[in-house]
Amino acid sequence: TSSTINTTVNANSPVSVSIAASATNICAGTSVTFTATPTNGGTTPVYQWYVNATAVGSNSTTYATTSLVDGDVVSCVLTSNALCATGSPAASNDINMTVNPNLPVSVSIAAIPSGAVCSGTSVQFTATPVNGGGAPTYAWYLNGGFTGTGATYTNVAPVNADQVYCVVTSNATCVSGNPATSNTLALNVNAAPAI
């Protein structure tokens, strides 16, 4: 009769990995971090990240990038070194990214009346923003000093060579050049003739 050999049979360890993103709907250039959560990855699992079909990142549980474009698909493949691992390498879920373009903010102003005015004539200025959002804020400046808010500003006592401009702050998402400064209008005010 021989010696007895005791055997240890380990259960199979199915391998899987899931990933999550810090955000999936972003503005262009925003940093996004993806995090992998392994199951039965072993002591030294290997991670390979992909954007679409291109390998990216390093062998890490996280992948961060600022260069995503609209429609990019991010995924991860996990190779386990666990004992009795099955289904390795394992592919993660896909994360579809929505990347919104950055919209430049600008504003222009116009005066009514637009030409030369007589002393004592009020001049109304109107701001027209681009990519201002649903509720932009306005700050008007007369000769460099703050003088009012709102989409319009009226100078009730204009002086020749007065300079007016407006600064608009957009509340839209994914904008650039915010706040934006308008063109500057210099007033041409003529003295009232003596009668």
Image (cartoon, rainbow, N blue to C red):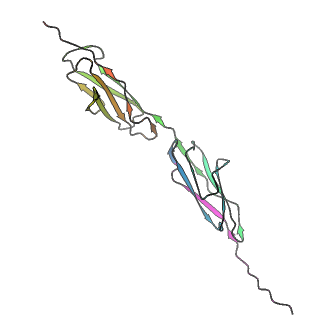
Q: Give the range drawn in magenta.
A: 1-24
Q: Which residue lies furthest to the left in this view?
A: 195
Q: Residue furthest right?
A: 1
Task: List x then y, in percent, for residue 14.
Answer: 67, 68
Report the residue at 29% width, 22% height from top: 163
Q: Residue furthest top?
A: 195
Q: Where is residue 175 in the image (x, y as percent from the top left)?
A: 45, 38
Is the stretch drawn in magenta largely helix, strand or loop? loop
79 left or right of 3 in image = left
Image quadrant containing the N terminus: bottom right
Q: Position of residue 99 (x, y in %)?
A: 53, 43
Q: Is residue 184 left or right of residue 20?
A: left
Please say whether residue 15 is one of the residues in the magenta stretch: yes
Residue drawn 26% across the image and 23% down it: 124
Asked if residue 165 lies in the magenta stretch, the reply is no
Q: Report the residue that reaches farthest toward the front.
A: 144
Q: Percent from the top left, x then y, of residue 86?
A: 71, 67
